[in-house]
Every structure is written in C-alpha cells, then in structure tokens.
C-alpha cells in the first residue's frame, strides 16, 4: 500500500451523478470516469464502501404531485437504489474491481441481506462494498444510511461526491460572491445550518468522529488525492 492518510472510506454517491449532464438514467462517459476513480482506490488497497442514491431513477420530492404518500415514495426510492447498486456491481466487474452488494432489504436471488460480519470479511478481502436499500425504512435519507454504514465498516472518512467543489456559504450558481469553506468543524456546520447532510447524519458523524469531505466527483483523480491527504474540497471535522 502506498502512503495514504485514510485506509477506509465510505463514498456517498448520488444517483444524479450517474447521469452526468445528460437526461439519461446512465451516462457512460460519466460512469467510466467515476469507475476509474474507484479502481484507483482499490489499487491503493483502500477499503471502500459505497452508498448510492436513486435520483437518476426516482425523486421522492415529486411524490406529492403524483398522489403518493411519503412512505410509499420512500419505498420506491429504496428499491431504485437496489437497481443502481446492481448496475454498479456489473460496471465494476467489467473493469476487474471485485464488488459485493448488501441490501437493507432482502430480495431473494437478487441481492444479499445486509450482515455486518459478512460485509467486514468481504471488505477486508478487498471487495468494494455497495450498500443499497437505505436503512430499509421510510423517512430516513441516504445521508443517514451512509453514516450508519461508515460506522459499521470502521471508516475514517465519508466522501460526499457532488457536482460542486466543496461547501459554500450560499449557492455559488446563484451568488458569484459565495464563499467556499476549505475546512469546517461539525459545530460550525450545524450552527450555520449548511446543507452538507441532514442534521441527524451530521450529528452521528460528530458523535462517532468520522470526518466528511465534500468534493466534485468530476474532477480527475479527486478521490485518490483525498485519501492521500491533499486539499480538494471542504473537510468537515471534529
């Protein structure tokens, strides 16, 4: 293993990231670039967990206009993360990166139900672990899922992969004078009500001393740079 600052990370990847700038469910060139970055981590022997969202397939925020209850909209999103996870496993296998899916909901003959001991064995053997189906319950975000799985796998860092290069005091797309934070404490992030993760997830990270790095996943080699300790986005720390 090369000298790296972090040995175990949880990558939180939105479903929208798989679309790139296209209107398709998957954008091949975008996904290929993300997969290359995950492969770089695997080659460094970094233990990687991955929580994938579902925004490319279904957005619960639109549930009301379809007449869906919040719980059922959440269940649809939960199932959509399973679909994304199945695709990601195949995408990784195609570039010879071993991966294993664990689901909060058992779906016979498709995905294995989450089991911490089994997950840790596969993680330690070098598999990328893909966590799907959220917590298995409605009303919980994939942010919360990411933190819970990071705790279980002993991750030192959660990398929240976005389309922007860090955390700003206002929306940089709207405000050209928006200030970017290079570093923030959890107390500062919570006090300023910055939209990094939902507050329950942030508090869990603070309690369990797991740092968060918010970065632009479309910047080449950004994941590798982060685990090697380079300043890339915004670090939220205790």
Image: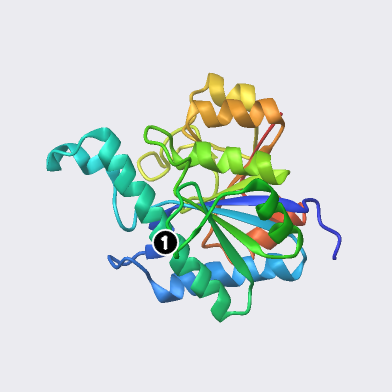
Q: In this view, does 207 lie above or below 114?
A: above
Q: Residue at x 73, y 57 (%)?
A: 121
Q: Is residue 192 above or below residue 153?
A: above
- Visible residue check, residue 116: yes
Nearer to me, 62 or 232: 62
Q: Which residue is drawn at 35% across and 64% down?
A: 21
**Which scheme is used to colour this image of the protein?**
rainbow
Nearer to me, 149 or 171: 149
x, y percentage for residue 65? 13, 40
User: In screen coordinates, is 164 left or right of 175?
Assistant: right
Q: Quadrant of the N terminus?
A: bottom right
Q: Mark 1 points at which residue?
A: 84
User: In screen coordinates, is 180 left or right of 7?
Assistant: left
- Visible residue check, residue 232: no
Q: Residue at x 75, y 64 (%)?
A: 125
Mark 1 closeness class: few <14, some 14–19, many ≥20 residues within 10 Å: many
x, y percentage for residue 197? 50, 35
Q: Which residue is drawn at 61% across and 48% down?
A: 115
In the orientation shown, which residue stands out farthest toward the front? Answer: 108
Q: In this view, does 221 lie above or below 180?
A: below
x, y percentage for residue 67? 13, 38
């Amino acid at each position: 293993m090369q000298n790296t600052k972090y040995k175990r990370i949880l990558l939180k990847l939105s479903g929208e990231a798989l679309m790139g700038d296209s209107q398709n469910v998957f954008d091949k060139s975008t996904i290929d670039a993300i997969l290359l970055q995950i492969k770089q981590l695997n080659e460094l022997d970094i233990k990687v967990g991955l929580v994938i969202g579902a925004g490319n397939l279904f957005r619960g925020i639109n549930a009301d206009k379809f007449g869906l209850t919040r719980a059922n909209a959440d269940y649809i999103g939960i199932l959509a993360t399973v679909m994304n996870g199945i695709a990601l496993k195949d995408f990784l296998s195609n570039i010879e990166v071993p991966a294993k899916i664990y689901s909060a909901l058992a779906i016979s003959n498709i995905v294995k139900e989450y089991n911490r001991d089994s997950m840790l064995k596969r993680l330690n053997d070098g598999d990328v672990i893909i966590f799907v189906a959220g917590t298995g319950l409605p009303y919980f975000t994939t942010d919360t899922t990411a933190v819970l799985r990071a705790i279980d796998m002993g991750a030192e860092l959660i990398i929240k992969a976005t389309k922007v290069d860090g955390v700003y005091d206002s929306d940089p797309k709207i405000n050209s004078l928006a200030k970017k934070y290079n570093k923030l404490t959890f107390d500062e992030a919570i006090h300023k009500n910055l939209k990094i993760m939902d507050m329950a997830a942030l508090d869990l990270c603070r309690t369990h001393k797991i740092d968060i790095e918010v970065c632009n996943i479309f910047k080449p080699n950004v994941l590798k740079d982060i685990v090697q300790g380079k300043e890339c986005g915004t670090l939220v720390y205790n």
